[in-house]
Amino acid sequence: MNENKDTRLPPHLHDIQREVEGYARAFGLDFYETIFEVLGYDEVNMVAAYGGFPNRYPHWRFGMEYEQLSKGYEYGLSKIYEMVINNNPSYAYLLESNMDVDQKLVMAHVYGHVDFFKHNFSFAHTNRKMMDEMANHATRVRRIIDRVGIEPVESFIDRTLSLENLIYQHAPHFAPKVRKDPGAPEERIEVRGFKYDREYMSGFINPRAFLDEQRKKLEDERAKSKKFPEKPERDVLLFLLDHAPLERWEADIVSVVRDEAYYFAPQGQTKIMNEGWASFWHSTIMTTRALKDSEIIDYADHHSGTMGTRPGVINPYKLGIELWRHIEDRWNRGRFGKEYDECDDLRARRAWDKKTGLGRKKIFEVRKHYNDITFIDEFLTAEFAAEQKLFVYGFNEKGNRWEILDREFQKVKQKLLQQLTNFGQPIIEVVDGNFENRGELLLAHRHDGVDLRVDYAKDTLGNLQALWRRPVGIVTRVDGKGVLMRFDGRDHTDRKVDF
């Protein structure tokens, strides 16, 4: 066991950390050095308001988040048990008022998270020194405020934050695009003219004026046919950085917001897997190794509180831990492969147990190669959905109440995958940076069942227009019909289009 070089814990908590870390490593978890700090509830709320980082750029939203967390704690509505940062070394925070059994649970949970951060492919391209990078971002923004003033900077951050989800979350897994210099000259078009048999006849058959005229026609055709961008661009913030007429300080802020959006994106893509993995391991470590007899009731109470569910709300802790257990059980019993899949005898399927014992190996493999969508798509079975009583719900207009609409497995699975795709948000792309040859920005909503909220769309167009400095529009569907929503800086207009 590698003992932490940096510990900021009182002696008895340091002993607990060494004990829990030993159990975690013995089970095969592999994680970065993890530094725990003990904070009072007010300090925990402050750090949580900054997304787990002790230093972020100044903005009013962090203050509002702090107020909300503080009221939740004071009124007994919520309590933060753990926070952990994807960093190397990783940092995690313990609440000072927690009992020792809670500290054990949190430490075991944290080691599960850090193992996941280190090995899951979604985090492979994240900045492992983000603690330092966040501090650098704070310094950059404060210097801009000193030069420009707090009000214009805060107003610009407000606008940019409304666009922070307009990135392409999977972009880090592809080779970076070559960002072409917009001022670079175009490749010269080669014009051959008419064929000729004798070299000395070339000047008569293809005079220079004729060739220049033909070249100009081809260049004009190329300019008209060339799309800008050539392909739809999912990373709207990158497109704005490359092409919007931003001042240097504005581009710096857009860059900061975009960097942080890409850092946090994998956590959104793996929420169910990640929380389920950490919960699976804190449950395993606590119930098989770390619990004292006197701590069982308190542990059961706090663990069950985390696993609680309510209709219509996905609890990533509960869904995740149960699906990890389901996978381990299936591979321990050999409930996979061609023979099992083709067995249509329900009694035989229920009794199926080849005692293969491959469950633990399988879950470590899965935690490396999947995200929430592929995890659910691959491993959420009809048997699991029935066991967990999963269903689709909706609002009954006639009965004026929420109710179960469907228990059919494929519909349940489809609804769940739809909620996870692009974090359940509409997919937006830049399709034209010079719409109708007027310098207008045109976006398109790739409609896949998620409608735009018209009020949100109008607000977002207003913020985009402020950055683009020209009219902006988006093509979408409203009531099943194609609509172009446009904002020119003063007025919102709509017009029907084929879409």
Image: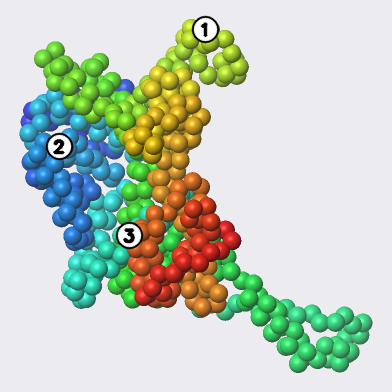
Vertical relation: 37 (above or below) 207: above
Residue at 13%, 50% (x, y): give it: 67
For the C terminus, the quadrant is bottom right
- Dot 2 alpha-carbon crowd within 10 angstroms: few under 14, some 14 to 19, many 20 or more: few
Reading the image, the residue beneath label 3 is 162
Distance, label 3 to label 1, CA atoms, is 54 Å
What is the CA distance from the residue labelled 1 to the residue labelled 2?
Answer: 46 Å
What's the CA distance linking mark 2 and mark 3? 28 Å
For the residue pair 376 and 12, the one nearer the viewer reads as 376
Residue at (92%, 82%) from the top-left corner? 197
User: 277 left or right of 377?
Assistant: left
Q: Can residue 229 be seen in this view?
A: yes
The residue at which mark 1 appears reads as 347
Instruction: Name the N-terminal-most of marks 3 and 1.
Output: 3
Task: Work out whether residue 116 can be spotted.
Answer: no
Q: In this view, does 23 lie above or below 112?
A: above
Mark 3 and mark 1 in contact? Answer it, CB < 8 Å: no
Q: What residue type is labelled 2?
A: Leu
Q: Are marks 1 and 2 in contact (CB under 8 Å)?
A: no
* Residue 225 at x, y percent in the picture: 64, 72
Q: In this view, does 328 lie above or below 459?
A: above
Assign a secondary structure to mark 1: helix
Say which element carries label 2: loop
User: What residue did someone put label 2 on?
Assistant: 77
Position of the N terminus by quadrant? top left
Q: What residue type is labelled 1?
A: Arg
Q: Quadrant of the rendered structure where residue 32 is?
A: top left
